[in-house]
Image (tube, rainbow, N blue to C red):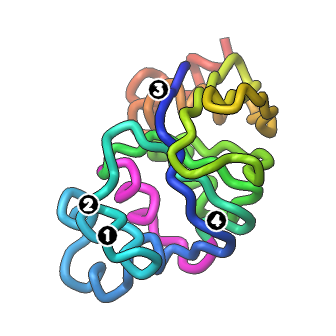
């Protein structure tokens, strides 16, 4: 799997209510509507500035807070296929995998806003290349089951295709 896009920087401790405000979730859980409010608490103009294929780049503890799955699905609905962060909350990380959003744990401190990034998922290995600076970053390796789920596009499609019985062969 190869993903390429522009870096869109956010900081540390971006919680799920920053990703999509709880006031918005009271109105609807439809990610096609909610994508218009992505990260509005952090930057009111962020959602309007996102281009399909952009990549979120964060610091520590991305996705902390409530375990609402919509935090991952609204990022995908905005056309963002991956999030790179120094660390993730455990529940957000699993929600991302289960919905086909690629979470890449790596050192993001040298990435600048709008840098062109390329992510390669090869087996369980995640490699990141900052095409703007030429730097390479090693992402934390994912377990084979998680890469199989991501490769299928999420847990639902993974199970439809035979899931664990296909992986165990």
Q: Nearer the viewer, mark 3 or mark 1?
A: 1
In this rendering, the answer to whether 7 lies above or below 40 is above
Percent x, y of residue 23? 30, 88
Q: Are marks 1 and 2 in contact (CB under 8 Å)?
A: yes
Judge the density around disc 1: few (<14), some (14-19), many (≥20) Cα neighbours within 10 Å. some
Residues marked 2 and 4 touching at CB (< 8 Å): no
Query: 98 or 122: which is nearer to us?
Result: 122
Check disc 1 and report the residue beneath it: 45
| Magenta stretch bounds | 64-77
Q: Which mark is residue 48?
A: 2
- 30 to 51, vertically: above or below: below
Mark 4 lies on residue: 62
* Total count of labels: 4
Front label number (4 vs 1): 1
- The answer to which of 112 and 72 lies nearer the viewer is 112
Q: Indicate whether residue 10 is drawn in magenta.
A: no
**Vertical placement of 130 versus 10: above or below?**
above
Q: Nearer the viewer, mark 4 or mark 3?
A: 4
How far apart marks 2 and 4 lie (CA) works out to: 21 Å
Report the disc number at residue 152.
3
């Amino acid at each position: 799997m190869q993903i390429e896009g522009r870096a869109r920087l956010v900081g540390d401790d971006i919680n799920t209510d920053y990703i999509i405000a709880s006031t918005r979730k009271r109105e609807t859980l439809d990610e096609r509507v909610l994508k218009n409010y992505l990260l509005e608490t952090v930057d009111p103009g962020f959602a309007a500035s996102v281009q399909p294929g952009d990549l979120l780049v964060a610091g520590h503890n991305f996705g902390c807070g409530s375990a609402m799955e919509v935090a991952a699905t609204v990022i995908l609905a905005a056309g963002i296929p991956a999030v790179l962060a120094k660390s993730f909350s455990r529940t957000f990380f699993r929600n991302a995998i289960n919905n086909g959003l690629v979470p890449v744990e790596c050192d993001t401190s040298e990435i600048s806003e709008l840098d062109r990034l390329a992510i390669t998922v090869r087996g369980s290995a995640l490699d990141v290349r900052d095409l703007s600076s030429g730097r390479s970053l090693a992402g934390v390796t994912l377990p084979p089951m998680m890469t199989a789920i991501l490769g299928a596009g999420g847990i639902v499609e993974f199970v439809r295709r035979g899931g664990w019985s296909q992986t165990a062969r």
